[in-house]
Image: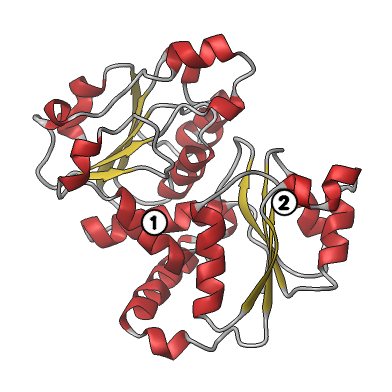
Amino acid sequence: MRSLIDILELSTEEIDQLMATAADIIANPKKYCEVAKGKKLATLFFEPSTRTRLSFEAAMYELGGNVLGFSEAQSSSASKGESVADTAKTVSCYADIIAMRHPKEGAPYVASLNASIPVINAGDGGHNHPTQTLTDLFTIQSEKGRLANMTVGFCGDLKFGRTVHSLIAALSRYVGINIVLISPTELKLPEYVRRDILVKNRIPYKETNNLESVMPELDVLYMTRVQKERFFSEEEYLRLKDSYILTEDKLTAAKSDLCIMHPLPRVNEISVSIDKDPRACYFKQVLYGNICVWL
């Protein structure tokens, strides 16, 4: 096995193979129920998580393996000042693979350089989240039947949204992808993502602050919350947190087969009334995450 720090470390062929394996796991769960027997996963979560941490743990148990680790930095020796490098070296003595979430960009990469076992990036700051991206790709594949020739809208916090950055990078390698970026000026997509992914790969894209104006174009709408934990100013967060709230009336002009996604947790950016809409796919993402994080 090898580490997975960035989604671009996987080729499109490898991603397609992973999607096929995920589908096979769903169809034949008993076939995989002991493939990780005798193996241990260490979940090193220096940042709070519900879905990602539990999806790793649930997947490992379903594959017949075991789990150890911690769910917050205060529960680890990081609270005593231990470095990420030393933590990785130490945990390598106890486990067969590490899943790490960390508030600092690049921390899982540092861990991978020092660990003697593979490291999976379960989210590092506002940078990357490759396992969520695999879940998102599988959701799109399952709901739309393809990963190409579609228009995908990203709405909300595009500046700090690591799931957004990772998914844009992955989709940029499929043909016929158009990207629509919907955000307030303060939360626009970082220039490095625009330059290194969209412009470099000649992906058609446009930016707007008006969700309703582009709704009819979208095949997939990826909503995100404004992330309080990434802001330095409480006042700035409060000013921007309700920039976009998806309600039933805003879906009037949307396609009948629109796929509405959200990496969760949701605050109030999607009305709970949308949950019953057949186009709502965000809880399906959670279900698919249990399959995809351990591929």
* Nearest to the observer: residue 52 or residue 115: 52
Q: CA distance from mark 2 to mark 1?
A: 23 Å
On the picture, is 106 further left or further right than 50?
right
Say whether residue 147 is visible: no
Disc 1 crowd, CA 10 A, few/some/many (<14, 14-19, 20+): many
Instruction: Name above or below for residue 76 compared with residue 39.
Output: above
Which residue type carries mark 2?
A: Pro
Q: Percent from the top left, x then y, of residue 230? A: 60, 27
Residue furthest front as drawn: 75
Residue marked by disc 1: 286
* Nearest to the observer: residue 15 or residue 185: 185
Instruction: Name above or below for residue 235 compared with residue 165.
Output: above
Residue marked by disc 2: 108
On the picture, is 182 further left or further right than 81?
left
Q: Quadrant of residue 252?
A: top left
Q: Quadrant of residue 265?
A: top left
Badge number at residue 190 = none
